Amino acid sequence: MAERGRGWARAVRGLLLDVSGVLYDSGAGGGVPIAGSVEAVRRIKASGLKLQLCTNETQATRQSFVRKLRALGFDISVAQVTAPAPAACRLLRERGLRPHLLVHHDLVPEFAEIDKTNPNCVVLGDAAENFTYANLNEAFRLLIGMEKPVLLSLGKGRYYKETDGLKLDVGAYMKALEYACDIQAEVVGKPSKRFFESALAELGVPAEQAIMIGDDIVNDVGGAQQCGMRALQVRTGKYRPSDENHPEVKPDAYVNNLAEAVDIILQEL
Amino acid sequence: MAERGRGWARAVRGLLLDVSGVLYDSGAGGGVPIAGSVEAVRRIKASGLKLQLCTNETQATRQSFVRKLRALGFDISVAQVTAPAPAACRLLRERGLRPHLLVHHDLVPEFAEIDKTNPNCVVLGDAAENFTYANLNEAFRLLIGMEKPVLLSLGKGRYYKETDGLKLDVGAYMKALEYACDIQAEVVGKPSKRFFESALAELGVPAEQAIMIGDDIVNDVGGAQQCGMRALQVRTGKYRPSDENHPEVKPDAYVNNLAEAVDIILQEL
């Protein structure tokens, strides 16, 4: 149970919400909303709190991701989504990097404006079915052939839950390429501080007046706390009881689900 | 060039040879012998030196591996091959482990006698085309669902060279599963000390009278030296010039290829 009415819920002006595992469980056919979450998002908006989704989703463009969320009943606009691919495009442009993409085919349009000839880096996303043996070998060969290999990883999650079970996330494949090439990837997405700062800028609320709500103890909770935000872990999505014994990260509170978090926060407004 | 006639070649009674990248370059159609290696193996045998192949090969049973080597011209018997799968079978039996196999389909017969019902561990080999997204997710789900996940990895190589280019080796996939499950794999194969000790026992020569010859600076050279053997790195196979600046491992000598190593060793006999 959440610690109701405690200080963690006070003086809030905006919420950053993780999406998969908080709003809905992803899966075949678009996934299913988590009970109470559609109504919770509606109540956040009605309350006047600012709202921004902060996701490591890389299986779709923001446009199609928002279409899917709207079809599930969530009243969300594209501008309310902070996602790794647009952040990666900014970084590629700043540094003159030309990526080889190992990403989900539905994400490719996000990189439409980026020069991809003669690649001098690899961008790795949650490629799902594109994580084939051949594609992994191709990305590896490009990296190992570079004088100074650059690997940008859109997130570094370990795994996530879909309706048909747990799936390896991009972080596992990032580790495979890091080890094979003896390099360190640069993470674009949660838990990178720069990424949370972008999300806060888009939220328009300073860190100390924002709460992050997520199901990932390290990437959501730990990452947000390192930026000076409060952070809650929901007991939905990939949450596991052992998360409550995490050696390094302690959420400001646990809540059973988003609806419970919103109940408490709105009571404290 | 090798440092000819130096102390490293003295008082030798037996040789452990890595196979892929030393005897031949693997690849489609069985691969191709490395120039001079067939004759070098013949000269070792004629000299009276003992010979054992010490391989992390897990894409075939020892029987079919030896058939392939014989077809390439190498006069080798099954008893002269130390490989991870038989070592893993001994370990599974000792500890009452029932494996889920994520291995090359040609390796499966090595585990024919092992109880694989209701798995309580995962055995990971160089599964090659079997490294599919679905198979990796399946192995991950089994591990994450175990109270105490046990992952046995048949080697931990980063990559190897086939005739059509470099390929990710089992170590990369081991790292992916280690990270996703937050566990440490147990390595069966080079560079494990226990594995080298098995190879030395099969060679019938003590460590200080044996030389390991391989193309992998860490798994061949470093592993053998940790067991008290001398070790040479060949400049064939996956050898890269940057290996000669490895921060931790220094071979007893570099040789251009197996033939050159055998020349020098036989001169010192």
Image: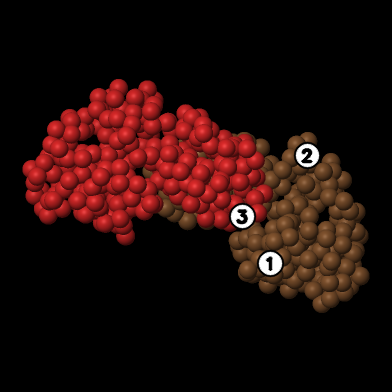
Chain colours: A brown, B red
Q: Position of residue B197 (x, y in %)?
A: 33, 50
Q: Position of residue B62 (x, y in %)?
A: 38, 32
Q: Are marks 1 and 3 on the same chain?
A: no
Between residue A154 and residue B145, name the one nearer to us.
B145
Quarter assignment of residue B162: top left
The residue at the far bottom in this view is A7
Residue at numbered disc 1 = A245
Of the image marks 2 and 1, the number of the one nearer the N terminus:
2
Kindly tell me whether residue A205 is visible in this rendering: no
Q: Which numbered disc covers residue A30? A: 2
* Secondary structure at numbered mark 2: helix
Quarter assignment of residue B68: top left
Q: Which numbered disc covers residue B148? A: 3
Residue A152 horizontal side relative to residue B207, left or right: right
Q: Nearer the viewer, mark 3 or mark 2?
A: 3
Residue B14 horizontal side relative to residue B133, left or right: left
Q: How far apart are the alpha carbons under marks 3 and 2?
A: 33 Å
